[in-house]
Image: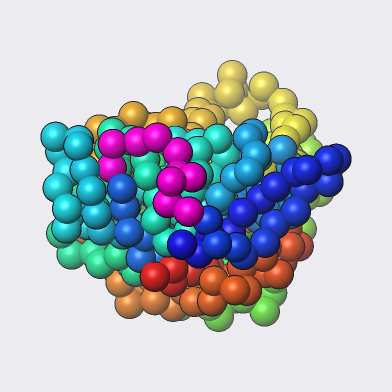
Amino acid sequence: MKAILIEKPGDTQTAAVTEVSEDQLPEGDVLVDVAYSTLNYKDALAITGAAPVVRRFPMVPGIDFSGTVAESSHPDFTPGDRVVLNGWGVGETHWGGLAERARVKGDWLVPLPEGLDTRQAAAIGTAGYTAMLCVLALERHGVTPEKGEIVVSGAAGGVGSVATALLAAKGYEVAAVTGRASEAEYLRGLGASSVIDRAELTGKLRPLAKERWAGGIDVAGSTVLANMISMMKYRGVVAACGLAAGMDLPASVAPFILRGVTLAGVDSVMCPKPDRLEAWSRLASDLDVGKLEEMVTELPFAEVIETAPKFLDGAVRGRIVVPVS
Ligand code: NDP
């Protein structure tokens, strides 16, 4: 079967489209015919070797996929079931979705929710499911649309695009932050009520800046996240999930102790199954599939490797879906 294989024979890592035997697949109780995989920021890091995402070689990348169960000895799945998988170390320590078949633990799989097909599930992918986890985090901390505008960083990227569409669909006003002025129209099309230049969040940090937003979803980290926190309204909540700007957080405690601001961390990889099921059920009910389609670019399998570096330049819009078989 066809697969992308990352190898590291010496000090340097290589990635190539190749033929592998099904016998080489790792252990697992469910075999899935992969319909679609996707390209996420983390896949780009894995394929380019820009960060040590891959923990075991050789590795098939692809942190998520959707498809149909081919064989199963897991009690919850039978052949023909349509499933989606995100995270759990797939594409990092366990062979991932950029291959025609994947063998995984059934406990990692989510049955495709009613109303979504395998292409739409892949279009949502880890980025979209993480965006939903961020929205759920805001809701859990009591951020309702009446509280005020929500700021979303990296808005033209995968997590940011889905977060913008999800929030707008629920009646929130969304301030979409982007480094690409050319994407303003796209972001308004997804439902953003205002589009903000990223430069407004990369300036020198003031411990307490003017109160602007009731909540935030941040994919950037570093100065962007620190500024976002300092601009929260009283009792504002920021859901932080990414590091596109950096791993550091040069922030002040002032917003936490003087404004009661909450910083909610969001992890999609090891997120427990009940939360995943809730997120996928909400994605199926809340996300406008027309808007989802506006975010999608379909990328041929053969072009995945050459496209990966574009992610690291912040040049990718929305979500990339890769038809596999
Ligand atoms: P994308 O590459 O699709 O989007 C990232 C966006 O961030 C870019 O499109 C760009 O948007 C913006 N950006 C790029 N560079 C910078 C910078 N230096 N400063 C501020 N913004 C920047 O990636 P994803 O949406 O898939 O992922 C976003 C982040 O979230 C990544 O760091 C990823 O690792 C992380 N992530 C974490 C998960 C978790 O479980 N915690 C799960 C999924 C993703 P624009 O041009 O609009 O500004």
Check the image and report above or below for 272 versus 165: above
Residue 292, x across and y down, in percent: 38, 70
> Who's the residue at 39% across and 70% down the image?
325
Q: Does the image show residue 170?
A: no
Residue situated furthest top in the rendering: 257
Direction from residue 201 to residue 99 in the image, left or right: left
Q: Which residues are magenta?
A: 21-30
Q: Is residue 260 magenta?
A: no
> Who's the residue at 70% across and 57% down the image?
15
Q: Does the image show residue 145?
A: yes
Residue 268, x across and y down, in percent: 45, 38
The picture quadrant where one finds residue 107 is top left
The picture quadrant where one finds residue 242 is top right
> Who's the residue at 85% across and 40% down the image?
11
Q: How is the image coloured?
A: rainbow
Nearest to the observer: residue 296 or residue 203: 296
Nearest to the observer: residue 78 or residue 228: 78
Nearest to the observer: residue 95 or residue 86: 95
Residue 250, x across and y down, in percent: 77, 31
- How many discs mark residues in the rendered view? 0
> Who's the residue at 51% across and 24% down the image?
260
Residue 249, x across and y down, in percent: 72, 32
Most common secondary structure along the magenta stretch: loop
